Image (cartoon, rainbow, N blue to C red):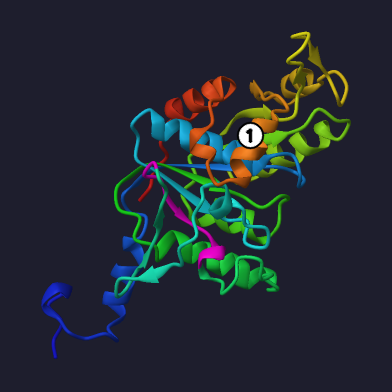
Amino acid sequence: MECNHDCSSCSSASCGERKEKEKKKGAEHVKKVIAVVSGKGGVGKSLVSALTASALGKDGAKVAVLDADVTGPSMGKVFGIKTKAYGNGSMIVPAMTKKGTKLISVNMMLEHEDDPVIWRGPLIAGLVQQFWTDVDWGDVDYMVVDMPPGTGDVPLTVFQSLNVDGIIIVTSPQELVSMIVAKAVKMAKMMNIPVLGVVENMSYFECDGCGKRHYIYGESKAEEVCEGYGVKLLARLPINPAFAKLCDEGRIEDAECVEIAPVVEAVKNAPMRNHE
């Protein structure tokens, strides 16, 4: 039959144009995308992602979290999501947290959440792209993408395909900080994506008894490193056992973290790129 390009009046499931339209539906109403990255693992990237998303939600924004760390997913546990993903016909339906944040993670598609994802890079990158195109995100003001560490297939896919408006770099106060920041900044520049700033996690420990700040990993070098690479140091987050407890209990949305406020402001003030 001759196509009139009105998919609503057509029952064909094999039409290429129909499939292309459906594929583009997923994130078409996501207004701003922020990727949280790190040059190495173990620096608290997922914690920063979760705290930022939660704070944006508390301000009344419509927020989504895309867990792009496929081989080390943690967002489901951090937000207390135990449900499995399901489809509504042509799209995947994201989970909804207790406070209304939409979330998708590979753990929602595994039989058991501790099952390992033993896939090669292209398969992992392909799944992340499907999280963007094939999930029914609906209206979203801010999407926070929790990235895997490093500069491999997934970061490349995210930067090329997800219309990222800016990145936040997470690091820790150790000697490797310069190299970590440098790798992330250089990749962002190569992909023409703005760097919103740097968050130094585990920056210090504030003693309940004496009230003093103790620099467990030594004095911070983040400020001078950021100046060297022309990026802004947004925040220094303390070592806080309460955050770890809330993550373990799936209640990160209950966290009160005043230090994350400059990160939230940077996300809000980041100009939107062309999302066409």
Q: Residue at x 63, y 22 (%)?
A: 235
In the figure, is residue 10 to the left or right of 29? left
Which amino acid is tagged 1? Phe
> Which region is colored magenta?
99-108
- In the image, residue 98 sits, relative to residue 23, either above or below, namely above
Indicate whether residue 103 is drawn in magenta: yes
223 or 54, nearer to the observer: 54
Callout 1 crowding tier (Cα within 10 Å): few <14, some 14–19, many ≥20:
some
Q: Residue at x 82, y 31 (%)?
A: 178
- In the image, residue 164 sits, relative to residue 182, either above or below, namely below
Quadrant housing the N terminus: bottom left
216 or 133, nearer to the observer: 216
**In the orientation shown, which residue stands out farthest toward the bottom?**
1
Q: Residue at x 54, y 68 (%)?
A: 127
Q: Which residue is mark 1?
A: 243
**In the orientation shown, which residue stands out farthest toward the front?**
209
Q: Position of residue 172 (x, y in %)?
A: 77, 32
Q: Position of residue 110 (x, y in %)?
A: 56, 71
Q: Tell me where residue 201 sits by quadrant.
A: top right
Q: Is residue 52 visible?
A: yes
Q: Residue at x 49, y 34 (%)?
A: 254
Q: Position of residue 165 (x, y in %)?
A: 48, 40
Q: Is residue 166 visible?
A: no
Tally the numbered discs: 1
Q: Tell me where residue 193 sits by quadrant.
A: top right
Q: Position of residue 3 (x, y in %)?
A: 15, 82
51 or 192, nearer to the observer: 51
The kind of secondary structure element at disc 1 is: helix
